[in-house]
Amino acid sequence: MTTTKPNMHAVAIDQETWPRQPYFYYFTKLAPSGFSLTVNMDVTRTLTWTKAHQVKFNAAYLYLVSRLLTTHPEMRVGYLNDQLVTFDVLHPSYTILHADRTMANLWTTYDNNFRTFYQHYLADQAEFSALPGPMPKAPQSPNLVNIGSLPGVHFSSYTPLPFKPLDSFFPIFQAGQFKQEAGRTTMPLSITVNHATIDGDHLSRFFNELQAYWDQPLQYLG
């Protein structure tokens, strides 16, 4: 079995000069909170492109979200060796199903080039998908972001419930089942965030920018 150590380059956050610090303190110490938002995204053009090029849609989904995250530093804040940092990049962590319907968690090294990322994704599927257990690929890393999907259900909302203190402030993504109507294909996408680092305006801009990605597969995937 081979493993790849993911890129973990990060910049330390100086909380004395960090503009976000008063909000970070408020939403971690005085009123810890987060929120979730689900939007129906139009994925028609990207889905059409993946079918035409025989590319797995899930790989395109993981890549586009991960790529957009590189432009949103507020979504890449976490801890590294007990130091609050902003990671340069987050690598997508996602689930797959074994033949017996048990789940496993995989992650794939992000690369800015989609073709390179796609080869990483296919290699991970080939090497780890048949291995038993919930986490067949090691090591895990502090800069993995959960980008999940529930392709069997078209939901209107999704909110994960953590049962332990958070050790990062990354968003959690969950996509749902496609729905076709009037020649368009939509997909519900839920993003759950920690208010310590992310506000509603950040999330609104992220959704709008991601829609632009879905609409231009040739530019971002081709």
Image (cartoon, rainbow, N blue to C red):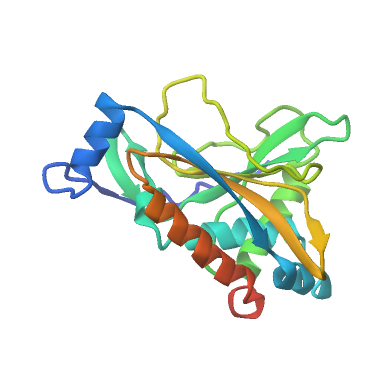
Question: How far across and how far down the image is residue 190, in percent?
Answer: 59, 46
Q: Position of residue 103 (x, y in %)?
A: 75, 32
Give 205 or 71, whichever is nearer the viewer. Answer: 205
Q: Is residue 81 left or right of residue 132?
A: left
Q: Which part of the image, by quadrant, shows the C terminus?
A: bottom right
Is residue 58 shown above or below 216?
A: above
Where 52 sits versus 130, above or below? below
Name the residue located 52 percent from the left edge and 50 percent from the top edge: 91
Q: Is residue 53 visible?
A: yes
The image quarter containing residue 215 is bottom right
- At 77% from the left and 61% from the top, the residue drawn is 56
x, y percentage for residue 43?
70, 65
Using the image as rendered, state which of residue 11 and residue 57 is in the foreground: 57
Residue with the most extreme right position = 99
Where is residue 148 shown, x and y percent of the image? Answer: 65, 44
* Residue depicted at x 58% and y 34%: 159
Up-down relation of residue 104 to residue 219 (above or below): above
* Residue 82 visible somewhere in the drawing: no
Labels in figure, total? 0
Q: Residue at x 42, y 22 (%)?
A: 165
